[in-house]
Amino acid sequence: MVPSAFVVVTALLLRLGSANLADESELPSEYGSLWPLPQSVNTSPELYRLSEVTFQIVHSPHSTASVGCSILDNAFRRYFAYIFSVSARSEGWAPATSETSGSSAEELRELQVTLTASDPECTQHPRSTSSEAYEISVAQPVAILKSENVWGALRGLETFSQLVYEDEYNTHLVNKTEIVDSPRFAHRGVLLDTSRHYLPVKVILETLDAMSFNKFNVFHWHIVDDPSFPYQSITFPELSAQGAYHPFTHIYTLTDVQIIIEYARERGIRVIPEFDTPGHTQSWKGQSNLLTPCYNGEKLTGSFGPINPTLNTTYDFINQLFKEISWVFPDEYIHLGGDEVNFDCWKSNPRITQFMQKQGFGTDYRKLESFYIQKVLDIVASNLKGYMVWQEVFDNGVKLKPDTIIHVWKGAYQKQLAAVTAAKFHALLSSPWYMNVISYGQDWQKIYTVEPCNFNGTAAQKKLVIGGEACLWGEYVDATNLASRLWPRASAVSERLWSSAETTNLSDAYKRLSKHRCRMVRRGIPAEPLFVGYCDYEYKGL
Amino acid sequence: MVPSAFVVVTALLLRLGSANLADESELPSEYGSLWPLPQSVNTSPELYRLSEVTFQIVHSPHSTASVGCSILDNAFRRYFAYIFSVSARSEGWAPATSETSGSSAEELRELQVTLTASDPECTQHPRSTSSEAYEISVAQPVAILKSENVWGALRGLETFSQLVYEDEYNTHLVNKTEIVDSPRFAHRGVLLDTSRHYLPVKVILETLDAMSFNKFNVFHWHIVDDPSFPYQSITFPELSAQGAYHPFTHIYTLTDVQIIIEYARERGIRVIPEFDTPGHTQSWKGQSNLLTPCYNGEKLTGSFGPINPTLNTTYDFINQLFKEISWVFPDEYIHLGGDEVNFDCWKSNPRITQFMQKQGFGTDYRKLESFYIQKVLDIVASNLKGYMVWQEVFDNGVKLKPDTIIHVWKGAYQKQLAAVTAAKFHALLSSPWYMNVISYGQDWQKIYTVEPCNFNGTAAQKKLVIGGEACLWGEYVDATNLASRLWPRASAVSERLWSSAETTNLSDAYKRLSKHRCRMVRRGIPAEPLFVGYCDYEYKGL
């Protein structure tokens, strides 16, 4: 009784040139449940046992960090719990050639973490240039995790936790393994939209957890937009008082934001806020004289358009607001939006027409938009921040700082990436990774098979692609369905952005991702199933 | 940055000939948050207050039921809690013309429930012929809920709980109201598939709760299928021991089944189990010599096909199994499946070829299938059960008892319904209501606008359409995403099947359904949002 099901899945599988992935092979992946796949993995059949009573994750005596580097101390505690409470069952993943059984295996006593940089960055925030490289050597009697700084160590801890599994007697085992790993792209983000639906803080924290399980390192917080303004500004509290869905229950206070930033930092995740202007600002009504009043002929309609770019007060406001934002959000970058500006209201307003004439813009409202954006960019740059913008800002020829990141989100992305990088700007890809757009079947495969550097350009141009973001726009998403819509579909993006360009085998990916999604479920994330099957421990089970 | 979003939604809305439903009108529905809409609602601006301290739901002294009719006692307790902990906020729903404010309103002291039938059916199970009609009269000082028996009372309690709302001071209010209500269709079902993914018992119970909020009255339990056999049979325990995903953690014991049936009964929901044969039985491998061994030429391939219809042992097994099922599941009906039988394995098997010749079936394997189904139907009928079958059984010309229900699931459903009812069989519609099939945007509208009686046929034929079912097949659904995928999309089916055929206004439905989904969220069901907006109390909020 499942006609569409069968047809669609079959079509999808055929289109991607793969057989029924669920049945293709009973053999597990040689890489177990590792996700995203490290750059280099060498596993031996030699097995070690881990005891929950005696096993420890510790700072190596040779490390430049020690107890008191609380970002690591917390991570040790967190991963100890993941390892011993929620490891994968061995079935279908312990290398079949293991020489020893769990009961006769030698013991792995410790995971020693060694940081090598003179400043291990215990109290810093991750940056776009932070190294996330690490190496793991699992060998008796101690395993070694080595990295420059805390950021690589966090990635390595996740990988180590994915190496441990349980045999049928619940003994925790790990194979002798050597891993050398680092990300292919530096910017691996997830966008959440807290304007179309308000997302409670705990939903955002849960998402940050899941991001860390997938080695994502940027939370792009699309915090305000037309429908609501949940950010409670210290300087302009009327913005949320009048623009949020509810002025007390549906806002993010300064403390909320700080908790989210710190929770993200502890997982090696940058928080980049987006305050999109001059469009997408209908909810900014708490600031008077900011939005453009629309006219019908000579009469005010009572409705408002984009931010009014013709008033000095606008730039005073923008200056003060972005000063605050620059202080609240420590990341070096702010996302300034700049997309989808509707010119109708500007066109209707006689004062704007006047201004256009005075500036010699004719009737080209893109020039007015650029005039505005240019000023905003200069303000943000004066706050010593870099900026990201949606692709329209580039398309419209606004003068941009050389380190500007152009966020590609529409049209044929290969063409856009070629154009952006030809102009020597950094590019970030999202067009094929709109997680809110759903269809029936295994659509993770379509997400997975995107190759960001598959465009016409020089090697130098391709180096300008700094990564991508999985975007979850909020029209149809709130706390009820966010996690199951995002995971594990966004995991497909995470492997594409972390692992080597050669990591493209769909059948192997299916096997690892199925296990990875069950691990996410055990860690409390309601990641949805890829296809028919089961997890040893079901969500809400027993 | 939401191109597909915008395009798809706009297209959908245009196609359905409606404006942007979210913005179309700020006015609330005159029917508040009622869902599904009762047949007749008369609301007055006169308001009454309800006190959590003194308000009671009680058996009327004139009722044929009294304390000790525990199905009602439990429902009183449940709805008291829903009324006082999770009522909708008044904003946008209290009739604007209310004469009195909450603080000056008179008090509503009681809801008196009066059953009129000499046997109110307190200890019985709901049946396909049970009356669910009820009347509510809310007037000072007591409200009256009147019905024949407990089933109508349960529906009326849900409706009464939907009438109560809170004003801005959290005072619970209800308008003077008269409601006369009964369902348009007798069979309003939800199908869950526990074979493709195992669903923990608490997920099924949660679904039964949500079903009762939507006045669904049949849980069609597609309990076993190819991928797994989670039903633990007392007579044939090897079926789940060998066929379940895990013989202990991924099964339904007799106690589990009984808990589910009782939980459903308390909500006026019938439980109809489906044991689909002869296809969809790959997981029935725990019974030896049941499935057909497949051949490649003269050699056994080692794989198996549908149930072997040529052996007497097959029918002994079927007889014993269905005797048990008939005892475990008290409903008068069993769903026997009969869909999608693949003939390849039967064709390959020399003994089956022999049997075909002996029976004079030629090479028409549909005759063999009908031979099998006919025998199963007779066995089930001998256990005094009625049966439901998927449409193929009808299409293939199997001789059916007159009270057989044909479940329409594929092809042009108007044509199928016409054919089935022309043959004087009862018909049940599911084709347009596959909840597992998803697409981007407000697809609840497409679900909602289906009209089951929109086919060529006489009035007598249309009476044979007994209702429909929202089917949630399990390829891509498990405990992680079941609730948010099913609700509120299945609510669109519930209103179509309960309310009058004239209840078709999409804009009014949007307004009521938005509030109804927020109420489900407050009652613990993660029903996903219809579109941009918010609930007073978000899922996982604060």
Image: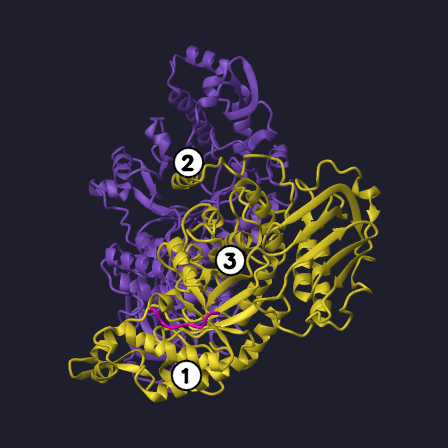
Chain colours: A purple, B yellow
The answer to whether residue B395 is above or below residue A280 is below
x and y, in percent, of residue A136 in the image: 35, 66
Quadrant showing the N terminus of chain B? top left
Q: Residue at x 51, y 32 (%)?
A: A281
Q: Which is in the foreground here, disc 3 or disc 2?
A: 3
Same chain? Circles 2 and 1: no
In the image: residue A152, left or right of residue B162: left
Residue on which disc 1 sits: B318
x and y, in percent, of residue A389 in the image: 40, 35
| Residue type beneath disc 2 | Tyr
Q: Main secondary structure of the magenta part?
A: loop
| Residue type beneath disc 3 | Lys
Q: Which mark is residue B463?
A: 3
The answer to whether residue B290 is above or below residue B218 is below
Chain at tag 2: A
In this picture, which residue range is highlighted in magenta? B397-403
Residue B170 appears anywhere in the view: no
> Front-most of B234 and A148?
B234
- Mark 3 neighbour density, 10 Å: few (under 14) some (14–19) many (20 or more): some
Q: Are marks 3 and 2 in contact (CB under 8 Å)?
A: no
- How far apart marks 3 and 2 lie (CA) works out to 65 Å
Q: Which mark is residue A387?
A: 2
